[in-house]
Amino acid sequence: MKKMRLRKPVLVAAAAAATTAAVWGVLMTTHAAFTARTATGPLAVAAGRLDVELTTSRTGQNPIRVDLSEVGPDRMWPPDGALTVSLRNTGTLDGVISALETVEVVDDSPAGSAELSQALEIAVSTNPAQNWHDPALTWERVAGDAAPSGRVVASELGSLPVGEMRAFHVKLRFVGEDDAASYAGATTSFRLAATVSQAL
């Protein structure tokens, strides 16, 4: 199989974009007939902060440029291995990595060219030795008709205790038409955002 070549590279900005979700205590009540009532006891709210740093294995390149002329016959990038993204909890509260999503997706397609973001899929794994050809692996489009500016591509990525770091691995693949000419000259860019919530 021959290499697929596009005239311009895909631009992927995997810059740090970590967000935090605050957790608030809520007093729940249940009501029975007429005057009966019950309520939960006091709910604890921890004082502290949830700070997260996001880095990539290619920190010297920001944004990261993905040249699809390098993908080879299996149409994947990076051609060997994966892009490693690391989250470190630098705060005082334990966290949970609840989601990784593509955000700020922007396509720049010449007249007559298809939108490249909808021809790219992304997979996320916590396994550094991931078999990227495993049919059980979940791939998600970088963007779609219903979510042109980005979408959740992975969820429930595990805990992030105070002072610890978690790494996950990202791979892109081109799933457009066999004739890459329909994407000639097209570029796309997006950022990766991680959502980390306070562990309960």
Image: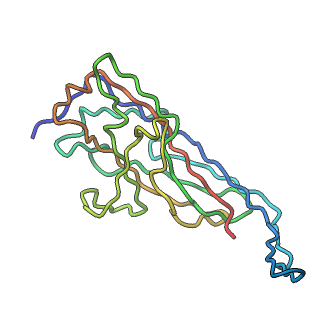
Colour theme: rainbow
Q: In this view, does 97 lie to the left or right of 171?
A: right
Q: Which residue is drawn at 42% across and 40% down?
A: 143
x, y percentage for residue 154?
A: 46, 55
x, y percentage for residue 146?
A: 45, 40
Q: How many marks?
A: 0
- Single out the residue that lies furthest toward the left: 1
Q: In this view, does 107 lie to the left or right of 32?
A: left
Vertical comparison of 79 with 180: above or below: below
- Single out the residue that lies furthest toward the top: 111
Q: Can residue 60 be seen in this view?
A: no
Q: Which residue is drawn at 20% across and 36% down?
A: 177
x, y percentage for residue 178?
A: 16, 36
Q: Which residue is drawn at 20% across and 25% down?
A: 181
Q: Is residue 43 visible?
A: yes
Q: Quadrant of the C terminus?
A: bottom right
x, y percentage for residue 79?
A: 27, 44
Q: In which quarter of the image is the N terminus?
A: top left
Q: Is residue 16 left or right of residue 102?
A: right
Q: Which residue is drawn at 35% across and 34% down?
A: 66
Image-quadrant location for residue 184? top left
- Single out the residue that lies furthest toward the front: 34
Taking depth in this image into account, of 62 and 5 the one nearest to the observer is 5
